[in-house]
Amino acid sequence: MKLLSLEDGVRAVKLAREAIETYLKTGKKLNKRLNGVFAEKRGVFTTLNKHRMLRGCIGFPYPIKRLDEAIIESAIAAATEDPRFPPVELKEMDEIEVEVTILTPPEKVEVEDKTELPKKIEVGRHGLLIKRGFYSGLLLPQVAVEYNFDAEEFLTQTCLKAGLSPDCWLLEDTEVYVFEGQIFAEKEPRGEVVEVDIKSCKL
């Protein structure tokens, strides 16, 4: 899958911010289409950080929508629908850094012995998606680095994110998927957009 250029990354982050601010001002979804890679179906998450603390994060793990549409919808949802936080107010956008993570399609990890799963996960490269029955949870690649998780703790935390027991990844009917992400983020609110090195999670 083709990587985005920095120019594309800048456009992605600006589109996310415009979508949020348009919605907060008017209550309407931004109707905008971009060309090139933005016409392709990609998975994407929009993350909002305020004073370096998470303020919202929602997205689409699978490439089911055009990238531009997925960015617009995930950005609005991150600002208004993340159940962990109250909806963002327009005045807050001067204090919020917008971050967009473009995802590769999730790939199921196959192992004969579930205890071998941590060996298949590369911290600093892989994000995790865990499914069991009606439950599912996802953590982006940068989360493991930011919290200094090893592969086993990353699996445990993704199980908890799914609302499951911390060791559910060891059970036979639990499905574990890995994916990769390309991150673009504002260095400061409305500031320069850069590509983030996942391994260090530094701008």
Image (cartoon, grey):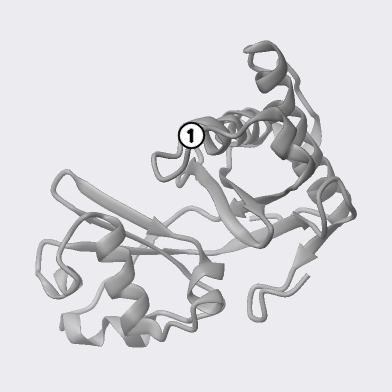
**Rendered view: 58 above or below 54:** above
Residue 16 appears in view:
no
Residue 170 position, x and y percent, is: 15, 75
Residue 51 position, x and y percent, is: 69, 58
- Say whether residue 86 is left or right of residue 44: left
Residue 43 appears in view:
yes
**Rendered view: 42 above or below 3:** above
- Say whether residue 56 is left or right of residue 136: right
**Rendered view: 92 above or below 119:** above
Residue at the image point whose x is 64% and y is 12% from the top: 28
Q: Nearer the viewer, residue 137 or 177?
A: 137
Say few, some or many: other residues with alpha carbon within 10 Å of mark 1 (under 14 / 14 to 19 / 20 or more): few
Residue 176 position, x and y percent, is: 28, 65
- Say whether residue 37 is left or right of residue 151: right
| Image quadrant assignment for residue 168 | bottom left
Residue at the image point whose x is 57% and y is 29% from the top: 73
Quadrant of the drawing holding the C terminus = bottom right
For label 1, the SS is loop
Report the amino acid beneath label 1.
Ile
| Image quadrant assignment for residue 16 | top right
Residue position for label 1: 64
Residue at the image point whose x is 31% and y is 58% from the top: 161
User: Residue extending furthest front?
Assistant: 91
Q: Nearer the viewer, residue 154 or 188?
A: 188
Residue at the image point whose x is 56% and y is 35% from the top: 74
Quadrant of the drawing holding the N terminus = bottom right
